[in-house]
Image: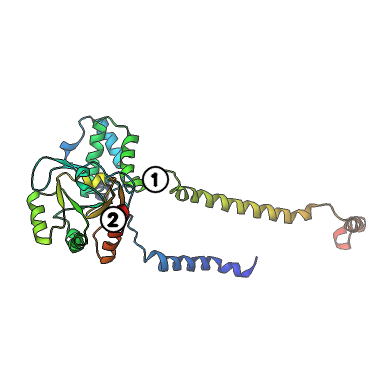
């Protein structure tokens, strides 16, 4: 019972926007390529949904455009460029690395590097702070130690 | 460790809340792509609304002019109709490109809400929406005398400031 309910929920979640099967590319390999591209292209009216998932009219139009271009023998890269020329970085769910997107790509790594660097520096500082304890005893301390060794206090001597 | 450092996370939290409240809440999160601004107007071929052989949009625009993408099924297009009329009254040349519409419906729309267009092309497949890099309807593009897109307005024209901005862009595009 529960298993069936879960299967239904999974089916509902995985259900992607449906095109008329007669619009599919004849070659299953090409259709597969088209679908993997759909996952990478943003629906421009939905703000944060791929065209694979969107029911919007324009998402359908872009899906058909991608199918047309695949049928015409264009490469994935050429098709993405075709869309990029029209909508810019916004169209790609994984934006390209460039002057405008550098901050987006670099910031997480910068935070990890800066944080790691700070932790490293702190650790080195505390180790440096603890270091004097490991240095050799001063002359006065050595003398006191020797005295203790030669004349242990009564309680320790027992 | 200094005591006040304990409050540092709280300070960051308050700063984040302030940033959200004062900046982010008042800002539209809607992205308005403008990748086609600065590029030549795309080649769109469609028949005129009143019928006849297909013509290229670029041969009809004769900039500086505005290209307005609209449709009879687009509610915000009704909202912006009076502002397009104002633009026409101020001397702007506006070419309309009807998107994914039946010619009869487009004609009915224009007779009901006003026809500010020097010419309307009937782009049944909505190719212009894609090739202009639009994200919905309506969108208005400013085309200069060389046929280059120099500015755009995303969404409906909603006030006189939008009208003035387009007129200023047209002036500059001369």
Q: Residues within 10 Å of mark 2 (few under 14, many from 20)?
A: many
Q: What is the tally of numbered marks visible in this picture?
A: 2
Q: What is the residue that sits farthest to the front in this orientation?
A: B174
Residue A89 position, x and y percent, is 37, 47
Q: Secondary structure at mark 2?
A: helix
In the image, taking residue A102 as reference, residue B138 lies left or right, namely left
Numbered label attached to residue B170? 2
Numbered label attached to residue A14? none
**Residue lying at 60% horizontally and 51% vertically, measured from the top left:** A117
Q: Which chain is home to disc 2?
A: B
> Could you confirm whether marks 2 and 1 are on the same chain?
no
**Res A142 → quadrant:** bottom right
Residue B91 position, x and y percent, is 21, 59
Q: How is the image coloured?
A: rainbow
Q: Is residue B55 visible?
A: yes
- In the image, B146 versus B123, the foreground residue is B146
Q: Which chain is home to disc 1?
A: A
B157 shown above or below A103: below
**Quarter of the C terminus of chain A within the rendering:** bottom right
Residue B71 position, x and y percent, is 16, 53
Which residue is label 1 attached to?
A: A95
**Residue lying at 18% horizontally and 51% vertically, measured from the top left:** B96
**Res B83 → quadrant:** bottom left
**Res B1 → quadrant:** bottom right
In the image, taking residue A17 as reference, residue A41 lies left or right, namely right
**Residue lying at 20% horizontally and 48% vertically, measured from the top left:** A57
């Amino acid at each position: 019972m529960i298993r069936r309910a879960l299967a239904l929920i999974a089916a509902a979640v995985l259900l992607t926007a449906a095109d008329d099967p007669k619009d599919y590319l004849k070659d299953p390999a090409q259709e597969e390529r088209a679908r993997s591209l759909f996952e990478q292209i943003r629906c421009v009216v939905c703000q944060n949904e791929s065209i694979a998932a969107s029911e919007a009219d324009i998402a359908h139009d872009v899906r058909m455009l991608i199918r047309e271009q695949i049928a015409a023998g264009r490469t994935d890269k050429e098709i993405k460029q075709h869309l990029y020329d029209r909508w810019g970085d916004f169209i790609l769910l994984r934006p390209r690395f460039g002057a405008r997107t550098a901050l987006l790509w670099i910031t997480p790594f910068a935070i990890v590097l800066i944080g790691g660097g700070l932790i490293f520096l702190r650790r080195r500082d505390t180790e440096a702070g603890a270091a004097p304890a490991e240095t050799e005893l001063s002359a006065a301390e050595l003398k006191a130690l020797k005295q203790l060794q030669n004349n242990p206090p009564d309680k320790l001597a027992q | 460790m200094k005591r006040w450092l304990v409050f540092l996370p709280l300070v960051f939290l308050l700063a984040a809340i302030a940033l959200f409240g004062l900046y982010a809440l008042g800002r539209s999160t809607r992205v308005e792509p403008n990748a086609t601004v600065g590029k030549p107007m795309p080649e769109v071929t469609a028949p005129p609304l009143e019928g006849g052989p297909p013509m290229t949009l670029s041969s009809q625009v004769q900039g500086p002019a505005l290209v307005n993408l609209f449709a009879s099924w687009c509610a915000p297009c009704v909202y912006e109709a009076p502002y397009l009329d104002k633009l026409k009254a101020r001397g702007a040349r506006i070419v309309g490109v009807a998107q994914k519409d039946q010619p009869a419906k487009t004609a009915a729309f224009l007779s009901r809400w006003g026809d500010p267009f020097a010419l309307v092309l009937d782009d049944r497949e909505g190719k212009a929406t894609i090739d202009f890099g639009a994200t919905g309807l309506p969108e208005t593009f400013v085309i200069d005398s060389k046929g280059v897109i120099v500015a755009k307005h995303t969404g409906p024209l909603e006030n006189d400031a939008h009208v003035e901005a387009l007129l200023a862009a047209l002036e500059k595009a001369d």
